[in-house]
Image (cartoon, rainbow, N blue to C red):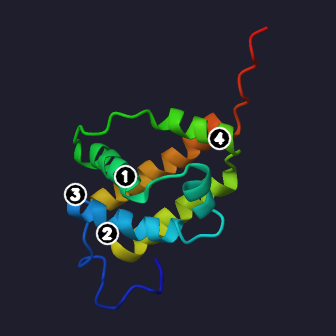
Amino acid sequence: MSKARNAADSPATLPDLDSPAHIQQFLQLFYERLLNDPELAPVFLEVAGIDVRVHLGHIQAYWEKLLLKENAYHRHTMNIHRALHAKQALTDRAFDRWLAFFRETLANHFSGPYADRALQIAGHIASNMKEQIVRRPAPSPAL
């Protein structure tokens, strides 16, 4: 846990990621970190060219599906990242950095079973992305 947490923000008083509003709050804090990071911001803003408002809506729906069993997200996350990787190689370091920011944002602002589940899922996401995108060679073109 980070020392940045206020004494009044004991784990018992921190919100959990148990509602759309809390997920939105988490994502705003998380993306504030990502989009100000000199290594990750260019991937999001220049290579992927995201519209932050639109992207946050997609990511909000994604996490609501994973944590709250909502059904508004219908995109193929792995294929989106494969296309991004084709533009600029994604690295283990990038996914590790993403996960570190995710973990720190949760630890500083949220606590509870949904936050714990989100961290577990994020770890699986980073691991799967590294395995399926970074470490897997691109398919050979057909002759």
Q: Earlier in the sequence, mark 1 or mark 3?
A: 3
Label 2 and label 1: CA atoms lie apart by: 27 Å
List the residue tagged with mark 3.
20
Q: In which quarter of the image is residue 4?
A: bottom left
List the residue tagged with mark 4.
85
Q: In which quarter of the image is residue 12?
A: bottom left
Q: In percent of the image, x 63 and y 43: which residue is there?
A: 130
Q: Identity of the amino acid at label 1?
A: Val
Q: Which residue occupies the foreground of this view, 129 or 117?
A: 129
Label 3 and label 2: CA atoms lie apart by: 15 Å
Q: In percent of the image, x 60 and y 42: which residue is there?
A: 84
Q: Which residue occupies the foreground of this view, 31 or 96?
A: 31
List the residue tagged with mark 2.
111
Q: Which of marks 3 and 4 is nearer the N terminus?
A: 3
User: In this rendering, would 71 be left or right of 55?
Assistant: left
Q: In percent of the image, x 40 and y 85: which residue is there?
A: 5
Q: Quadrant of residue 41?
A: bottom right
Label 1 and label 3: CA atoms lie apart by: 16 Å
Q: In percent of the image, x 40 and y 76: which residue is there?
A: 108
Q: Position of residue 100 (x, y in %)?
A: 55, 64
List the residue tagged with mark 1.
54
Q: Identity of the amino acid at label 4?
A: His
Q: Earlier in the sequence, mark 2 or mark 4?
A: 4
Q: Is mark 4 on a helix, strand or loop?
A: helix
Q: Identity of the amino acid at label 3?
A: Pro
Q: What element carries label 1?
A: helix
Marks 2 and 4: which is nearer the front?
A: 4
Residues at badges 3 and 4 in contact (C-beta under 8 Å)? no
Q: Where is residue 60 in the image (x, y as percent from the top left)?
A: 32, 52
Marks 2 and 1: which is nearer the front?
A: 1
Q: Which of marks 1 and 4 is nearer the N terminus?
A: 1
Number of labels in the image equals 4
